[in-house]
Image: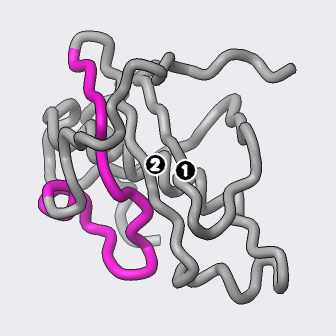
Amino acid sequence: MPPPALLDYSHVDFSRPVYDIEAIRRINPQRNQMEHLTAVVWVDTVNHAVIGYKDITENEFWVPGHMPGFPLMPGVIMCEAAAQLAGFYAQKYKLLGGDFVGFGGMDEIRFRGPVFPNCRLILLAKMKELRANREWPGDV
């Protein structure tokens, strides 16, 4: 049996987003095939937690190739969706300052089931640690 989810989302009304895709686009820079956040449905600024989702369609760029005949959302794309949710929260609520939020990593990732086209991927994020004022190391 998997461990309990990071947050209890049984009380969340997914039909009433706090931030829709247009509000997300005003904060997040990702566009086109790299947009992996449809809506934010719950925000807790006291405990720095947020819940959102990505509605998966038949038109996702990965559908034809992962896996042919059995389209399964890649885990790395699920991680990107979670990063976009956390980045949205950090930028919207000005946790770090600056114009850009980079994502440094993830620990203890849990995939709770397969995600297919015409499904909704529910995303949960909660701040564990804030490391502000880190700068891009320059040209690589």
Give the labeled residue for mark 1: 121
Q: Does the image show residue 135?
A: no
Foreground tag (2 vs 1): 1
Amino acid type, mark 1? Leu
x, y percentage for residue 29?
25, 67
Q: Quadrant of residue 30?
A: bottom left
Q: Is residue 125 rendered to the left or right of residue 90?
A: right
Three-letter residue code for mark 2: Ala
Look at 14% across and 47% down and name the residue there.
Answer: 98
Q: Secondary structure at mark 1?
A: strand
The numbered disc on residue 83 is 2
Q: In the image, is 69 to the left or to the right of 71?
A: right
Q: Position of residue 54 (x, y in %)?
A: 45, 56
Q: Earlier in the sequence, mark 2 or mark 1?
A: 2
Crowding at mark 2 (Cα within 10 Å: few <14, some 14-19, many 20+): many
Q: Which quarter of the image is occupied by the N terminus?
A: top right
Judged left or right of residue 10, residue 92 is left
Identify the residue at image location x=39%, y=34%.
51
Residue nearest the viewer, comparing 133 with 74: 74
Residue at 38% x, 45% y is: 85
Extent of the magenta region: 23-45
Which residue is at the far top?
46
